[in-house]
Amino acid sequence: MNLDTDRAGFLVTFSANDLEAREGIRAIAGQLRQQGISEERTGDVEIALAEAINNVVEHAYAGVEAGQIHVSCHLRAGRLEIRIHDRGRPMPGGDLPSGEPAEPADLPEGGFGWFLIRQLATEIKYERRGDKNLLWLRFDLPEKPDA
Amino acid sequence: MCLTSTDSGDTRIIAVNVERIDAAMAIQFKEDMRSETEAGPQRVVLDLSQVKFIDSSGLGAIVASMKQLGGDRRLELAGLTPVVDKVFRLTRMDTVFNLFATLDEALTARQK
């Protein structure tokens, strides 16, 4: 796992496996706390980000040699913009899943990932560019109270 | 092993001793739950107070743990921290489990 920071934000790069993904997600959440984002909003971002990254590990890189996942984060004017890119397989159908939630009474053991991302992110965008998947997640942040 | 069990009356209390039940932990969690619940009391309370983060893989592992209990045995959840609570509420899986704010509340509820 590698973390680079600059004035505009930070970039985290890690290998597409569960343990590296965990370290990457924790590093990003740690950076967001350091930037003064509230514990509650950091939690929202961490849930959505974990689901998006787990999907890359489990689906985009399924059956192909696992590569790297790059996550860049930019904070500006009351919003957090996250861009995730990988070189795995494209999203089926070239578009984002609709994210219909699984039915609780059926005791589902999965099928909540995209639903959670859609519930928590303000805006989501996906694009296949060459051999890359690009996923943007935007989160609006509440105004910081005056110090 | 990420779990520790103690019995209190007719309740088995299983404490989760990790901060994250995520994709990297889900399989181990399910296996550990199986060995902690192979025998023992009918009622199982999972103490989640040390868990700061859960993702949908972890949620799925808890659901699978309840199903593998089988029969009339129940799995109830106590001590949900804010992020864990949010994941259960957003997915409406809070409607499937009995949830208690603290382990004490879970144990008191039983005595009534």
Image (tube, coloured by chain):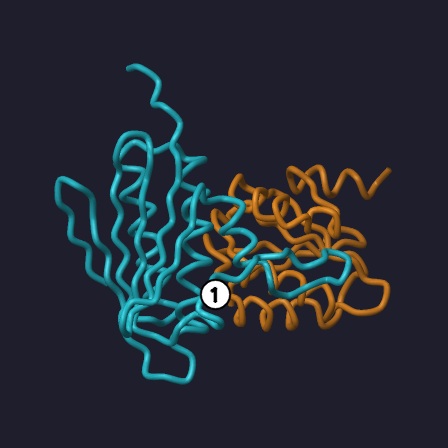
Chain colours: A cyan, B orange
Residue at (49, 51) in percent of width and height: A117
Query: Mark 1: which secondary structure?
Result: loop
Front-most of residues A99 and B1: A99
* Chain at tag 1: B
Give the image location of residue A96, x and y in percent.
Answer: 48, 61
Give the image location of residue B69, x and y in percent.
Answer: 75, 68
Front-most of residues A88 and A109: A88
Give the image location of residue A31, x and y in percent.
Answer: 27, 43
Query: B43 left or right of B48?
Result: right
Residue at (44, 69) in percent of width and height: A94
Identify which amino acid the numbered label 1 is placed on: Ala
Q: Quadrant of residue A37?
A: top left
Check disc 1 and report the residue beneath it: B23
Give the image location of residue A26, x and y in percent.
Answer: 34, 52
Residue at (65, 67) in percent of width and height: B36
Query: A135 left or right of A103?
Result: left
Q: Quadrant of residue B85?
A: top right
Residue at (65, 53) in percent of width and height: B46
Q: Where B26 falls versus A100 (above or below)?
A: below
Q: Where B91 falls versus A131 (above or below)?
A: above
Front-most of residues A46 and A123: A123
Which quadrant is home to the C terminus of chain B? top right
